[in-house]
Structures are given as C-alpha cells and as structure tokens.
Image (spheres, grey):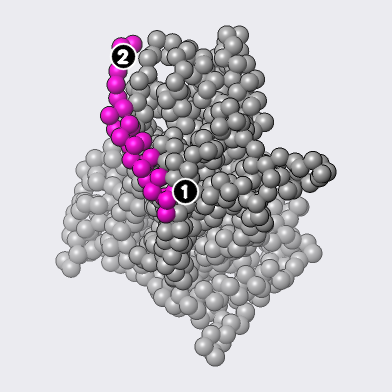
Amino acid sequence: MAKCRTDCIERPLRICFQMLGCFIGSHPWWFLITPLILSAGLGSGFYFLVDRMSNNIEEQFTPVDGQAKLERKYIQETFPGNESMFSNLRLSTSGNYATLIATSDKNILTVDSLQDILYWDFKIRSMVVQFDNQSFEYVDVCAGVMGSCTSNDILDIIKCNASNIHAVNLTFPWYHSDVRSIPLYLSLGSVKLDKDSSVVESAEAIQLHYYLREDTKAKTDLWLKSFLDLVSNESSTSLQVSYSTSMSMQWEFEKTPASVIYLFSITYAIAITFSIISSWRLDNVRTKVWVASFGLLSTGLAVLSGFGALLLLGQPFVMTAASCPFMILGIGLDDMFIMISCWQRTRVLDSVPERLADTYRDAAVSITITTLTDALALFLNYSSPFGSVQTFCLYAGISVCFCYLYNITFLGACMALNGQREAENKHWFTCAKIPEDLPSRNSKAFSICCVGGSYDHITEKEETESISHIFEQFYGPFLTHKLIKAHVFVIYAGYLAVSIYGCWILKEGLDIRNLALDDSYIIDYYNNQRQHFSEYSCNAMVAVKQPLPYWDEEGQRQLHSCISNFESLHYVNSTFAWFLSFQQYANAANLNMSSRDAFQTHLPHFLELTPMFRQDINLTADSEIQASRFFIQTLNKTTMKDMMVGLRKTAEECPVELLVYHPAFIYFDQYTVIMDNTIQTILVAVVVMLVVSLVLIPSLFCCVWVAFAICSVTVGVTGFMALWGVNLDSISMINLVMCIGFSVDFSAHIACCFVSSPKRDVNEKAMDALAHLGYPILQGALSTVLGVVVLSVSGSYIFRTFFKVVFLVITFGLLHGLIFIPVFLTLFGAREECC
C-alpha cells in the first residue's frame, strides 16, 4: 500500500488540544467552577420532569407515521361510531372496557362454576363508585345497544341462570339461536367438542367483557380502577380469575420507573466503587482516587445538564431515556481512564500545565473521535419512526456532548489540581506533605499510609501499574505470536458463524405485554388469553372505498371475487358482510334486487330490521352508497406480520379499492419497519463513522478496520441477542444504537494508538497500543458491565433487555478491541506505513 499522509486535520487538532490543556492547567479553578454553575442552572429543568413525562404506549412504541394510523383516520371519518348502537366489532380503537377470564382445571360449564361466574357478573354490575360526591354504577357508564347495556353472550344464552346449561345445546364456534348467530369462540376457551358434531362437551375458560362509553373518561377511568380493586380483592374456591382493562397496560407501564429506582442506586454504587478501586494506587501521592471520583461526578453533571436543558426547552421525556445515564456513565468512565493513562505517561518533573498539555495531545483526539461517533450515531437515529427511540437518541446525544465538554474542562481541571498536589508531594487525603521514601526510623506500616510520590527516575514517568505491566510484558507478546494469531482467526470464524445464525432466526416486534412488570396482574390475563383463546385472531374490517353498484351483477361479481381471495388465505376463517345478509334477506322474501331503484327501495327496510348494519354503510344525502365495509375473521395460523401484510396485499390485488384495518394493526405496523429501519440506520452510521475516522485518524487502513469493528460487533450483538431471547423491537433498537457507539470506542482507541505508535514493526505497534490502552479499555468495560449487572434481576423487560444488550456490546467490543482488531492490524497492516 502506498505511503499516504492524512493527518492534515489530526495533527493541528492535537496542537489545539495541547494548547487547551496548557491553558486549563494554568487556570484550573475557572474550568472547575464554571461547569458546576452551568449544570446547576440547566439542572433546574428537572423541576418540569413530571409535566414533561410522555409515556403513552401508542405514541412511543408504534411508528409515528404508520399506515394503520392513516387507515384508522379514514375509518373514523367514514364510519363514525353510534353510542346508542355499540358494537365492539366496529370499534376503530381498542375501546374502553374491563374483562376477566375465569378458568377451571375441569369443565367450567357446570352449574357450580357458572353460579360463581354469575356472582362475579352481579358484583361487577352492581359495584358502586363515587365521583364528585355522587355515586354511579355500571349501568350509568356502560356502552349500550338501544338503551340497554351490552351483555355477555354466554350469560345471555343461559338467561343468567346456571341451571339452564343442561337445557342448552351449545354449538361451537357459532351458536345459532332463534334471533341471531352468536360467536361463541369469543366467550368460551379450550373447548372440547363432540366427536361427530359441533356440540360443546366441555370448556376450560369463560371470558366476560364490560364495555364502557368513551365520552366520560374521568368517570370510566374511575370505574375501571374500582373494577381492578374489586376483582383483585375477591376470590373464588373453584375458579381461577385473571383480569385486565383497556387502561391496564398504560397504568402498569407507568409503574416501571418506580420499580427500578433502587436498582439504579445499586448500579451506580457498584460503578463508583469499581472505578475508585481500579484507580487506587498504593502510592499515597500518585493515587488517582480524586480524579476517578470527579470523573464520576463529571458524568453526573453531563446527565444533569443534558436532561435539564431539554426539559427546559419543553422536550417530552419518555421512560426509555432513563437508560441514558448508564450509557453516559460508560462513555465518561472510558474517557476518564484514557486520560488518566495518558497523564501517567507524562514526565513527572514537568510543570502541571505541560503535563496536562501532553495528556490532551495524546488523549483528546481519541476521545473526540469516540464522542463524535457516539453523538452522530444517536442524532442519526433521531429519524427513527418510533417516538421512544427519537426521545432516547435526543437525550443521549445531548448528554454525550455535555459529557465530552465536561471531560475536557471539568475533569481536566480536576487532573490539574490533583497534579499540583502530586507536584508538592502531598498526601491524597490529608494534603500534608509526606516523604517519598520510608524514613529509617519508621516501620513498614508507616509507608502504607504516610509515604508516596515515587516514580521511575530513568524515564521520569510514573511507575507502570501491575496490570499495565502484564499487558506490556505478557499479553502483547502472547497475542502477537503466530500460533495465537491462527487461533484468533478460528475463534473469530466461530463467533461470526454463530452471530449470522442468530441474525437469521431473529424475531421482530415488541410483544406489548413486555411493557408491564413481570409480577403484574395482566401477565396472567395475557397468558390465559393465549392459552385458551388463541385459536381465533383479529376480526379485521375491510372498507370498500369507492361507490359500487351493489345491485348490478358485475358489482356483485367483483365483491364476491374479492371475498373469495380473502377466504382463500389459509388464516381467514369466515366473512361477515351487510350485503351478504341483504342478499339472504332478499332471497328469503323473493325480492328482485337487480335494479338500482329496487335496491334503494328495499335497503331502508332491511336496515330497520338490522339497525347495526347502518354503521357499515356511508350514505350520501341522495341515498347513494359512498363507502361500505365488511368483516373477515382470521385464525392464529401465521405471524401477526404475515397476516397483516397478507391481508393488505390481497386488498391491493382486488379490482375494487379496498382498505383493511384492525385496531391491533397500529401495533403490528412496527413489524413492517423495524428491520429495514435498523439496517438503514446501521449502514448510515457506519458510513458516518468511517468519514469521521478518515478525518481524525491519519490512516485509511485503520479507519477501515474501525468501520469493520462496528459492523462485526453489531452483527455479533444482534445474533447473540436473538439467541438470548431478545426480539428486534424499538427497545432493543435503542441498545443497538449504543452498540455502534461502544464498538467505536474500543476499536478507535486501539487504532489511534496503533497509528501514532513510533514503533516500525506492526507487532511492536500492536504491543505498544495494548500496553498503553489495554488496561484503561478493560477498566472502562468492566465498570460498565458491573454497572448494569444489577439490572439483570429487574422485573421490567425494558431494563432486562438493556442489561442483555449492553452486556453483549461490552463483551464483544472488548473482544474486538483487545483481541481481534490488534491481531487483524498486525496481519493486514504488514505493508501499511502509517504517517
């Protein structure tokens, strides 16, 4: 490879940082006090934290411009609901409801079990709730049909008398009475049928629904809370009851922050303890306890300033942003350990401004690269279609910038003040001047706490720490041995193979129940629903968006063709449509419906007999059908993504302009964008990282390897994430954003040191880089892992996922930084002459 010169920016930048270090070293107090004042002022934004909280699940965890949201808007405008003719089938949202599932290990269709269920129903309907010094019951807030509250089908069938169960011949999945056909699959679960018929022999579960009006939210929310209190405090000897409401997931999600506050405290305590211990030296003068302490304070100030500034500006705060402090802690500590390492390589006899200038010259460019890449990766992800990801990236990106600013100013000032103490050979705690060597008249115990300040008088530098010595004398030569390099290649091949397999089996999408805590009551409800009522899936509505001659043979042929296409899908069970019922009505009454006038004449009478169908037809002032809708029942025989995409594709292929919608599609839309958006984000980030590295690292060759490390770590984290049971969703996507940043951190430090090493042989350059930065990188990685390990026992999926992904990021980033990248640099850089 030809000799190149690409340090036209890196070299002047080093000179600028050298001058800045000298200036800060000469005026440390200004750079110590100013960040404190700034962070105190910006931190006042936390006063608005409660007002800025924005944890609406739909807003934060579904695509901002999802297709289903546009479909919902059309449905709401074209088919407005009728409060007096409530139909859960026709809801454009999930509705306002309470529900319970009663299960039994044996047959639940017994007199005793049904009496218990009727008792539950009576207690719920007669529950008295207080609101504004007035009392109300279910009948006052219920969703109604022609003046009566909606009822539960199974209780209507037995006429609210458990003894009638023996007189009823239940058929499944539909029960046909004299008046109407009832979808019994919505009420009965785990049904066992007679061998030769559709008659129900037994069932294990019954589900009851209580729908409420949506015009009085304050009252209905209060009724729902009273429902939860009632059901949670009641018990049954023969039945197991699980329950939920339309607001349960939202309320349970909002409990998550309080559940992990104590874990945050433990986490930070562990990180602080490790950082201080790892910076401790037996030398009472050269120990870096105060620098480590103020480095931790610097990351805290960064979070305080970043969060506070955005809260002052009115930026909404989402709970996912609560994981930002862990990320900032890892980045800040990594930078701090790098700066300490560079300080220890400066000449002890130089003045403090000179030592800090040399520290900045060696460390600041490396820190700048990692900060730029971290911040850019985060800001690029602000374009994500998920509100939770946008908020996280904004809060994290601003905090990363403040972390960099405070590390350069505040932490540098602390190092300068600590350097002044070291120059005067003062004790780290008492600040009293102490001897460098043990006086002859004192015992050895005296040296442990009252002696310090020694250094290598030959190199005039601080003595190398024992672990750094291990990296220099043992690990570096060991890793660069030819046989070990061959083994590293084999290990990497295995790592890559397992990672690619994991990526292949990666599942997409956020299971909505994961937003609740593990011990939440709704987990039992979702488990029972999945166990007993999972055979049937969504009952999706299909809107005919164009005027159509429903009386004409051609119009009917087009509609029936579309319905046939839907029913040909293996996961579609049946179709329910007003025009099919109208045809049956006309055939039964021997009506001629072949003309427009006849159709328009008989339709009003049909709608009088079946008023519920009025909600499925959009009529103009002159009785023209502008749009209409019908319904298709799906089965749980495929993934939610394939079901939704398949229905939409079938609708597009229909000669009639159709739209398919179900309220759950709002959440299913994430499946259609999460993978493409993640891949796009990672590719763009890699390109940006490569550009930044090209500008600041004076070697095209090393820049390519930094980009390689980003891709390799990301593939590894994604693959092993799948093997660890984590789906690709908006929460894990946030952590993959961090993956890009951390993978740059580890690799960029080693690449920078490799390039700037004065050694000529590539093996010696790799050993030099490991000797200088091996221990600081290990310190930063361990402090981050120890900081998040407590979250592994969290009851929240969000924070457990955070732990899993961060653990994988740090582990694989460390493997690349300390094993793979050094070896690859020596093998593929033999002919590279970095300048």
Main SS of the magenta part reads: helix
Across and down, in percent, residue 724 comes to 60, 35
Instruction: Identify the residue at horizontal 44%, vertical 48% (top origin).
Output: 25
Rendered view: 519 above or below 654: below
- Asked whether 69 or 549 is in front, the reply is 69
- Asked whether 572 or 468 is in front, the reply is 468
Rendered view: 596 above or below 789: below
Across and down, in percent, residue 15 comes to 34, 37
- Asked whether 371 or 444 is in front, the reply is 444
**Quadrant where the C terminus is found in the figure:** top left
Across and down, in percent, residue 754 comes to 46, 23
The answer to which of marks 1 and 2 sits earlier in the sequence is: 2
Verify whether residue 193 appears in magenta.
Answer: no
Q: How packed is label 2: few (under 14 Cα within 10 Å), some, or many (20 or more)?
A: few
**Quadrant of residue 564 in the image?**
top left
Residue type at numbered disc 1: Gly
Rendered view: 314 above or below 730: below
**Quadrant where the N terminus is found in the figure:** top left
Residue matched to label 2: 3
Verify whether residue 18 appears in magenta.
Answer: yes
Instruction: Identify the residue at horizontal 54%, vertical 38% (top origin).
Output: 348
Query: Are circles 1 and 2 on residues that touch, CB within 8 Å?
Result: no
- Asked whether 798 or 596 is in front, the reply is 798
Q: Nearer the viewer, mark 1 or mark 2?
A: 1
Across and down, in percent, residue 595 comes to 19, 54
Q: Distance of mark 1 from mark 2, alpha carbons?
A: 36 Å
Residue matched to label 1: 412
Tell me the magenta residue range.
1-27
Instruction: Identify the residue at horizontal 21%, vertical 48% (top origin).
Output: 552
Instruction: Identify the residue at horizontal 62%, vertical 80% (top origin).
Output: 126
Residue type at numbered disc 2: Lys
